[in-house]
């Protein structure tokens, strides 16, 4: 038996369902489709039917599972991610985000552009998210 950690960025297709379990095939990773890449059995409580609201909005990192952040910080980062996606035409999806370890009160979200050879970080504070000025400033 081999264990695999699934990520919210993975698109999966249900192959078979038995009480308590779903056999899934990973069909895409972070928007790349063309699988199947791997398949296996997952407890049904870990598989959502359809995309979450975050995934529909192209927020594909495990924000809910980030235990380093409290509920207010997760809500603020979700709002920041949605603003960055609206304001930055180069940002196709948000693939990560958190608080800087050595700079409490400073946060970031990581954008993945259409050209996936690189990703980039948008840095912010909670106050930045509530202000009307753009989060993404062109350099």
Image: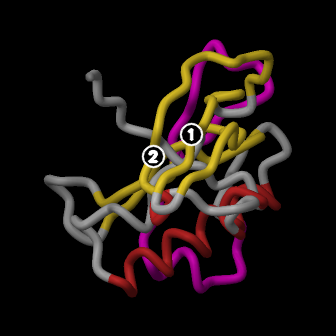
Q: Secondary structure at mark 1?
A: strand
Q: Is residue 94 left or right of residue 75?
A: right
Q: Is residue 123 left or right of residue 130?
A: left
Q: Position of residue 79 (x, y in %)?
A: 61, 75
Mark 1–mark 2 distance (CA, rounded to whole Å): 6 Å
How would you rate the neighbour count of disc 1 (Cα within 10 Å): few for under 14, some for 14-19, many for 20 or more? some
According to the picture, the residue beneath numbered tag 2 turns out to be 42
Q: Is residue 41 left or right of residue 137?
A: left
Q: Is residue 53 left or right of residue 25?
A: right
Question: Could you tell me which residue is drawn at 29 percent across and 29 percent down?
Answer: 3
Question: Could you tell me which residue is drawn at 71 percent across and 39 percent down?
Answer: 13
Question: Could you tell me which residue is drawn at 38 percent across and 61 percent down?
Answer: 107
Q: Which mark is residue 69?
A: none
- Decide which of 103, 59 is in the foreground and name it: 59
Q: Which residues are magenta?
A: 110-134
Numbered label tally: 2
Would you identify the image quadrant in which residue 80 lies?
Answer: bottom right
Q: Position of residue 68 (x, y in %)?
A: 22, 65
According to the picture, the residue beneath numbered tag 1 turns out to be 23
Question: Could you tell me which residue is drawn at 77 percent across and 40 percent down?
Answer: 92
Q: Position of residue 46 (x, y in %)?
A: 46, 59
How would you rate the neighbour count of disc 2 (Cα within 10 Å): few for under 14, some for 14-19, many for 20 or more? some
Name the quarter where the C terminus is drawn.
top right
Seen from this angle, which residue lies furthest left?
102
Q: Secondary structure at mark 2?
A: strand
């Amino acid at each position: 038996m081999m264990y695999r950690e699934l990520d919210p960025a993975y698109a999966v297709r249900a192959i078979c369902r038995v009480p308590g379990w779903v056999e899934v095939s990973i069909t895409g990773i972070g928007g790349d489709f063309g699988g199947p890449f791997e398949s296996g059995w997952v407890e049904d409580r870990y598989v959502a039917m359809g995309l979450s609201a975050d995934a529909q909005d192209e927020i594909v990192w495990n924000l809910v599972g980030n235990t380093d952040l409290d509920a207010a910080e997760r809500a603020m980062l979700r709002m920041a991610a949605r603003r960055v996606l609206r304001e930055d035409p180069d940002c196709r999806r948000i693939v990560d985000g958190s608080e800087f370890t050595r700079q409490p009160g400073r946060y970031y979200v990581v954008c993945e552009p259409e050209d996936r050879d690189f990703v980039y970080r948008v840095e912010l504070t909670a106050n930045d998210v509530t202000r009307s000025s753009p989060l993404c400033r062109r350099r």
